[in-house]
Amino acid sequence: EWEEAWSNYTQHWQSPDGAESYISPQELNEDPSILIPTHDVENPLIWENIDAWCRYSLESVEEEKHIWQEHDMKGDERLVRRIIDRAQLPSDQSYIYTVELVVDIYDEDPEVYRVKDVPRKALFFYHKQYKSDMFI
């Protein structure tokens, strides 16, 4: 009975929409050359399953404008609510991002900062809870 059910399941299983463009958090973390899609791009397998985090120091918050600086690499990892924009630097062809960061994920109504000029090295990716391929 179990074998028959398994056989039936495997014969009729279809991959989810967008599976061919899925990028794992491990791939995103290991290969900085992969372009990070912005949240306006239709790719539910990325943003429904993966959280982006950014190193950012709250010492930078004194100003109204939040512009990422090298010392922010020593800051805490903060949840990225959205990756808004991506721009290529002409100097070395690398990319910088504009992101919305959640200051305190445990706050019921958390502050959100829009931070510009975030380099790829400051962004990290993890599976959302219960969203790894182990739970498919």
Image (tube, rainbow, N blue to C red):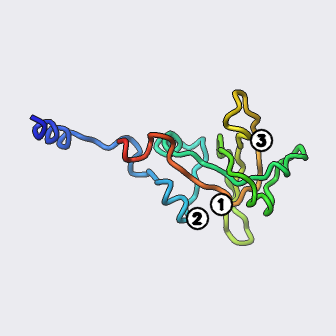
Mark 1 Cα within 10 Å, few/some/many (few <14, many 20+)?
some
- Residue type, label 1: Arg
Identify residue for label 1.
120
Q: Residue at x 14, y 36 (%)?
A: 5
Residue 113, numbered circle: 3
Report the side of 50 relative to 115 (left or right).
left
Judged from the image, the secondary structure of the residue bearing numbered disc 1 is helix
Amino acid at dot 2: Pro
- 44 left or right of 51? left
**C-alpha span from label 2 to label 3:** 24 Å
What's under tag 3, amino acid-wise? Tyr
In the picture provided, is 52 more to the left or to the right than 12? right
Q: Tell me which residue sits at (41%, 45%) in the image.
A: 18
- Rendering coords of residue 13 (x, y %): 24, 41
Residue at 51% in and 42% down: 128
Q: Separation of disc 3 and disc 1 at Cα?
A: 18 Å
Q: Quadrant of the N terminus?
A: top left
Which labelled disc corresponds to residue 32?
A: 2
* Relative to 103, residue 116 above or below: below
